[in-house]
Image: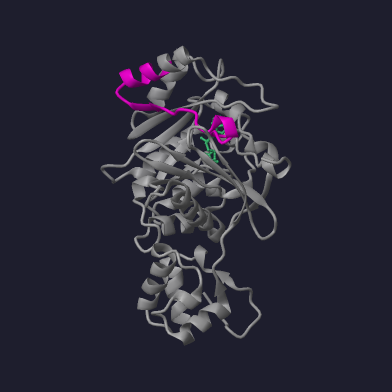
């Protein structure tokens, strides 16, 4: 990082910098390494965003910091709370682009689902975000800013200390097509000087960008979920066009390799249940044999329909039968309950329609 404090270079949003990057920045300002610890503790442990209030940092250093950097959160444009406790926010960035973020409480955890792009370029046939196309990548600061804001807001609403226990990069966008920013943001989520959430509770979800999965291992320890949705190329080609570029025979070994060498890690395979498309007994058997050599969990997701989409969700009995075939093969399977249906916050429904309508 090259910082010239006298130039007109745009200021940096500090929320996007991981520990190493803050170290580098402060090093260039002539500061000692312990300043990084002080600064990160003010921001992430005490939620202080104004340099003025960081009283154990010298006035001179604070002035320097203010000259080259700032700390800014996205702005909340709307909030909706579902009858089941799910909260959805519409957030706006400085260029007026908007994204959605969802908080899902269950008995034993609170999961925050954050976005990584404005829109998405992948065109998956069953996903509402796909109808928007891609506008732009979010910066690391915009991804981290979502977590910061959600923590503030959920503490206010729920009056509890740590409402966010899990974070998934499963909102709008494909995290691995915004690689550097998604990795930097998850590093800050997992850092004990950052949000201090364990690596098992921070998950990147991908539709299967194979070269990016191959790049991850030396850089991160984050958990990986893969939107599989079909166990053969013929069906997967139809519903996830990215499969034509990175077919299953490339995707599965890349995922296996990502967790190789660690004894307690698994890949979570997400599988949306589409009536008559991917939900037969034969599909379930193919799924089992496709992933049987990878330490795995399978998450069956009820398909959430949206206007303009012809797919239907499989029946409850079909989903149960499908799950049983997987269970009988000795593989862990969970069935995701649809949450926040009444506010369009359910999985795959984040289409930012609220920027056209009043939510
Ligand atoms: N691009 C990433 C993350 C965003 S999608 C990915 O593909 O994983 C988050 C999850 O929601 C994915 O598993 C996606 O396949 C699923 N999803 C998308 N639309 C859906 C819908 N209408 N109903 C249920 N799940 C959906």
Measured from the top left, where is residue 248 in percent x and y? Answer: 49, 32
Closest to the observer: 193 or 78?
78
Is residue 338 found inside the magenta-colored segment of the image?
Answer: yes
The part of the chain drawn in magenta is 322-348
Location of residue 26 (image quadrant): bottom left
The answer to whether one can see residue 111 in this image is yes
| Horizontal side of residue 334 vs 240, given as left or right | left
Q: Is residue 265 magenta?
A: no
Residue 254: tell me if it is visible: no
Q: Is residue 137 above or below residue 68?
A: above
Query: In the displayed structure, would residue 302 be above or below residue 247?
Result: above
| Image coords of residue 173 (percent x, y) | 58, 45
267 lies left or right of 6: left
**Up/down of 318 relative to 240, above or below:** above
Q: How many marks?
A: 0
**Of 208 and 297, the residue lying toward us:** 297
Q: Residue at x 43, y 42 (%)?
A: 111
> Where is residue 275 drawn, in percent x and y?
55, 17
């Amino acid at each position: 990082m090259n910082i010239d404090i006298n130039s007109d270079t745009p200021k940096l949003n500090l929320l996007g910098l991981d520990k190493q990057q803050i170290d580098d920045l402060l090093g260039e300002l002539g500061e000692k390494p312990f300043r990084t610890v002080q600064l990160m503790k003010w921001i992430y442990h005490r939620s202080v965003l104004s340099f003025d209030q960081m009283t154990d940092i010298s006035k001179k250093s604070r002035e320097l910091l203010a000259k080259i950097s700032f700390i800014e959160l996205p702005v909340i444009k709307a909030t909706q709370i579902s009858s089941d406790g799910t909260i959805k926010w519409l957030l706006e960035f400085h260029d007026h682009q908007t994204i959605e973020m969802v908080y899902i409480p269950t008995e034993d955890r609170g999961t925050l689902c954050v976005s990584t792009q404005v829109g998405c370029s992948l065109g998956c046939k069953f996903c509402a975000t796909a109808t928007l196309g891609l506008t732009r990548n979010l910066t690391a600061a915009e991804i981290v800013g979502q977590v910061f804001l959600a923590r503030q807001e959920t503490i206010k609403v729920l009056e509890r200390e740590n409402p966010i226990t899990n974070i998934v990069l499963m909102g709008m966008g494909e995290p691995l097509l915004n690689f550097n920013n998604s990795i930097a943001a998850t590093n800050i989520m997992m850092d004990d000087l950052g949000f201090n959430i364990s690596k098992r509770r921070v998950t990147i979800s991908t539709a299967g960008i194979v070269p990016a999965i191959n790049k991850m291992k030396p850089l991160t320890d984050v958990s990986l979920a893969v939107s599989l949705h079909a166990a053969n190329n013929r069906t997967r080609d139809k519903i996830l066009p990215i499969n034509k570029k990175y077919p299953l025979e490339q995707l599965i070994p890349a995922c296996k390799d990502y967790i190789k060498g660690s004894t307690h890690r698994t890949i979570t395979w997400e599988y949306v249940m589409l009536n008559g498309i991917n939900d037969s007994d034969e599909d379930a058997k193919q799924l089992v044999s496709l992933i049987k050599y990878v330490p795995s969990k399978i998450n069956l997701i009820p398909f959430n329909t949206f206007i303009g989409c012809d797919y239907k969700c499989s029946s409850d009995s079909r989903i149960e039968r499908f799950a049983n075939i997987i269970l009988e093969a000795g593989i862990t399977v969970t069935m995701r309950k649809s949450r926040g249906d009444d506010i369009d916050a359910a999985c795959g429904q984040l289409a930012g329609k609220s920027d056209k309508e009043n939510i």
